[in-house]
Amino acid sequence: MKFNTALESIKTYEAGKPIELVVREYGIDKDQIVKLASNENPFGCSPKVKDAVRAIIDNMALYPDDSMVKLKSALSNKYGIQSNELIIGAGSDQVIEFAIHAKAHSGSKVLMNSVTFAMYEIYAKQVGAQIIRTASREHKMDEFYALYQEHKPSIIFLCTPNNPTGDGLLASELVSFIEKIDNDTLVIVDGAYMEYARFKDPSYAVEPGDLVKRFNNVLFLGTFSKAYGLGGMRVGYGIACAPIIEALYKVRPPFNITTLSLEAASVALEDELFVQECIADNFSQMERYKEFAHAKGITVIESYTNFVTLLLPEEKNSSKIAQELLKKGMIVRDLSSYGLNAIRVTIGTRVQNDRFFELTDSLV
Ligand SMILES: *Cc1c(COP(=O)(O)O)cnc(C)c1O
């Protein structure tokens, strides 16, 4: 069968290996497996969220509230925005899909960092858009600006802090860049890890409310999958001026968020203390990774997220090391497909991190 030819250049997204797969492939006991591969919160979500979801478990027969009033008003309050400046997606992934389908088409250009979140390229290629990438591993605004002038892309992706490298962009630098971009170019600021950046250093924190008030060409993305510990519930959001949101709504399928997910995300916002405690623990555990790497002569990229990216010396092959770890039940992310001889490790609980150091010690 022939398919849309645009699909030919797309490589299927490689999600972090699920625990179930490692159980089957390596015959390791489920309890022995540690997954530090998808940047989930190792403490999960607030206990209040679990109670709230249990309390509505009998509501599964009816379609969800498609106006998403409860979650939208909680997010509007949090960010000081109007609810017509907000769209909810099944993960912020789905909002990326909406944005690309709404703005780009065959022949459009989409500009992004050399190393960044893989889904931008996949969605852009689905519509036949051309990918333009910067040269440096870090977001360099002068490189972005030069390519913007040369190519006049329809969409520019800025991922800060960036996945899979963990580094961040100063909010002031980001804003000065957007000021120079014309109104017809959609600038997507992916803030999947913004809660971590805000905690670590507020000068790296972008405030979506300020962005929408200032710019009519910016879409900010947030998610409940990382700091809020709700990866399994699939809830993310986009914040932009009303005309952008209106366009995104035209490509949104109805009932894209389940009743349980809407409730979980709404209640998660009521327990910010839980999230802040998890983030504090994240950065204190991250120090141990820095010490480990330092002792081993491995470079760690300064991280504003819940993961660390370890750049390995040439003689230590990242794919092999990730594979060796997998055999022992430790799932991390090999970054060789991103052109880096590096592994990305999600910061786990103290016990999970101990296990990582123990298993990795003899390999690097
Ligand atoms: C995890 C992640 C997302 C989206 O996650 P969802 O689970 O779809 O909300 C988006 N962007 C980046 C950079 C991420 O790391």
Image: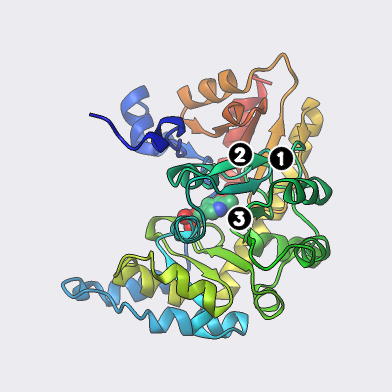
Residue at figure coordinates x 50%, y 73% from the top left: 245
Question: Dots 2 and 1: beta carbons under 8 Å?
Answer: yes
Q: Residues within 10 Å of mark 1 (few under 14, many from 20)?
A: many
Q: Foreground mark, 3 or 2?
A: 3
Q: Amino acid at mark 3?
A: Ile
Location of residue 292 in the rendering, given as x and y in whole percent from the top left corner? 74, 34
For the residues labelled 2 and 1, the Cα–Cα distance comes to 9 Å
Name, please, the residue furthest toward the top: 315
Please give the label number shown on residue 155: 3
Please give the label number shown on residue 289: 1
**Relative to 143, 106 lies left or right:** left
Q: Secondary structure at mark 2?
A: strand
Residue at figure coordinates x 54%, y 34% from the top left: 332
Q: Which label's residue is closer to the chain start, 3 or 1?
A: 3
Task: Determine if the C-beta at disc 3 is less than 8 A from ligand 1.
Answer: no
Question: Dots 3 and 1: beta carbons under 8 Å?
Answer: no
Q: Secondary structure at mark 1?
A: helix
In the figure, residue 155 lies in which quadrant? bottom right
* Image: 140 above or below 256: above
Q: Which label's residue is closer to the chain start, 3 or 2?
A: 3
Per the image, the residue denoted by label 2 is 345
For the residues labelled 3 and 1, the Cα–Cα distance comes to 36 Å
Q: Amino acid at mark 1?
A: Tyr
Front-lying residue, 183 or 136: 183
Q: Answer whether residue 44 is visible to the viewer in this image.
A: no
Q: Amino acid at mark 2?
A: Val
Q: Which label's residue is closer to the chain start, 2 or 1?
A: 1
